[in-house]
Amino acid sequence: MDENQRIVLAAKPHGLPRESDFALVRGPVPQPGPGEVLVRCLWLSVDPYMRGLIDAVYPYVKPILVGDTMFGGAVGRVAVSNDPAFAVGELVEGYLGWQLYAVARASELRRIDPQWGPPSTALGVLGMPGMTAYFGMTEIGEPQAGQTVVVSAAAGAVGSAAGQIAKIRGCRVVGIAGSAEKVRHVVDDLGFDACIDYRTEPDLAGALRRCCPDRIHVYFDNVGGTTYDAVMTWLALDARIVICGQISQYNDREAEVGPRRLKEFEMWRARQQGFRVLDYRPRYGEGIAEMARWLAQGRMRYRETVAQGLENSAGAFIGMLQGRNIGKQLVQLAQDAAMNH
Amino acid sequence: MDENQRIVLAAKPHGLPRESDFALVRGPVPQPGPGEVLVRCLWLSVDPYMRGLIDAVYPYVKPILVGDTMFGGAVGRVAVSNDPAFAVGELVEGYLGWQLYAVARASELRRIDPQWGPPSTALGVLGMPGMTAYFGMTEIGEPQAGQTVVVSAAAGAVGSAAGQIAKIRGCRVVGIAGSAEKVRHVVDDLGFDACIDYRTEPDLAGALRRCCPDRIHVYFDNVGGTTYDAVMTWLALDARIVICGQISQYNDREAEVGPRRLKEFEMWRARQQGFRVLDYRPRYGEGIAEMARWLAQGRMRYRETVAQGLENSAGAFIGMLQGRNIGKQLVQLAQDAAMNH
């Protein structure tokens, strides 16, 4: 068995991370103890929340410190198993970190059913981002047929799924995205009713008025910032605002300043709620089964942007924070020799 | 029967209203039609929401236009009844406006039980402000025993009741108020665990950290503005923010600027909700019965600030917007000659 390689945080970034904030470290392949499994990683996920972990913003989650292996979800195959729950060669998903080989407790791994879709979907539409969209939209957003739903970062892994779920629920769905290509993808491939390019639209609030004649019943917010401000000017009665992500703000240490949209809560009897997808982990089976059914029916579509090789994971992460990806940003570590296993 | 007098909006105020924005108009006492009742008003309520009605901020409520009689709740006695539901001399409460005599449909009036408390309480602790505190705290705030609850405008009609309800529920309750006298009242008379004077406290966020060692589980917000900003820096997990009022902002046409506190929703899984007390009007009976029981038990206390005479209602309203009152601000129109009726 060859050496392990992993990406560690080399320096704490200020603002947008740079490649030099990360370093590739080589070492021996770790050995699993009793009840543990060695996984050869095939796919890594890079996600916005990792930027928050570096800044230690989540009070209930261990932060990523300088010298730590970068934290993150990955898909791989079991290489060595010291637990009867997993056999060598099985496909698994877990928080394995940015590395070629990882040891994990069997209880921390989730078996992937290849019938549901390609293994990489366990990090996207059938994984954490898909579950974020599923539980955030259905449990917090609670869209009703005929209502209007607005989704920001609509071409991203979470936004693309969130909007399609609202479409399946019978809503008018309007996306907000950051390029002409993304806007085309959101409308033509994903079937949103409309999509606004916030980078070229000089009057986002006005564009929302045009695209949402019945006002906005659900706002699924992945970005925060001035996009949030614009949406808050056009709420419908009993509006629900799902605070899923704040990608426009993650590189800032201080809260950005904007109008305090509080009167709107009183006026429109609005509800705003943040959530943690990990709280729904016991219900992932239910969410994945529903999403897999929609995938099979062709009612749920997804796209992936794939970087090749562990050495490009920092670049993929930085590009994702800048919105360069469409759909789920992944890093492919190895061709899956055991695909037919 | 003598003449009627009423206060009309004479000019649309910009910022804090002035006395000259209101005018007293004399005219004949109105005559009730079939199904209607003539009420001789004894007590008027002045409330923060009236400032919003003048600016037409509530999309679902008829605004107060120049020339209109000022809208508001009042308590009076039935002088003439053309409806079998009410007898002459009965005490009633309704949205009768700022005037000595008002005609109302019987269905719009609520009978007051004098056993519950003095008639004026039907405009305070046993009326709209009390119901705002009751349903806002119990249904939206959902305080649990042992949790910490912060209430702004704690010496006001709503805040004083909201905090006492949380105390009854077994919470640690910290008020925020705007004078040494209010702070004393909130702690000594109402039994809050602590109260912060925001006008003299140079570091409100720091004071909240000192007063709330377990962080803040429920924030009952009557004021908005920088007080909200400070509270949002010290939320507990699963915090609930009840957007009840925004009195610091009502005189502003544009939303004041402050830090966008959105990351906090994600970090703390927080929920923020606005509500309209009128939605709970079908349940007022339940709320009033509970509040009246607490009053009788001495567990709920209230204070009133009373202006005398219709001609002083504009002044009372302006003073209330500036926070000059402690407890419920009322205007007494007449001594109740029929008190023993």
Image (spheres, coloured by chain):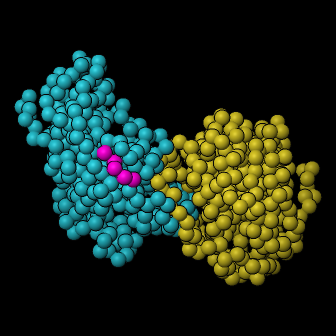
Chain colours: A yellow, B cyan
**Along the line of sight, which residue is nearer the eye, B93 or A11?**
B93
Q: Position of residue B73 (x, y in %)?
A: 28, 40
The answer to if A92 sits in the magenta stretch is no
Q: Position of residue B79 (x, y in %)?
A: 17, 27
Q: Is residue A5 left or right of residue B269?
A: right
Quarter of the image with the C terminus of chain B in it: top left
Q: Please tell me whether residue B52 is drawn above or below residue B121 in the rendered image.
A: below
**Along the line of sight, which residue is nearer the eye, A204 or B141?**
A204
Q: Position of residue A13 (x, y in %)?
A: 67, 79
Residue at image location 29% in from the left, 29% down from the top: B104
**Along the line of sight, which residue is nearer the eye, A198 or B300?**
A198
Q: Quadrant of residue A64?
A: bottom right
Q: Please tell me whether residue A27 is drawn above or below residue B307 in the rendered image.
A: below
Residue at image location 91% in from the left, 53% down from the top: A339
Q: Position of residue B230 (x, y in %)?
A: 42, 68
Residue at image location 86% in from the left, 66% down from the top: A307
Q: Quadrant of residue B148?
A: bottom left
Q: Please tell me whether residue A315 is drawn above or below residue B63 in the rendered image.
A: below
Residue at image location 66% in from the left, 66% down from the top: A248
Q: Please tell me whether residue B333 is drawn above or below residue A106 in the rendered image.
A: above
**Along the line of sight, which residue is nearer the eye, B203 or B48?**
B48
Let me know if residue A321 appears in the view.
yes
* Range drawn in magenta: B8-12
Q: Is residue A65 left or right of residue A121?
A: left
Let me know if residue B174 appears in the view.
no
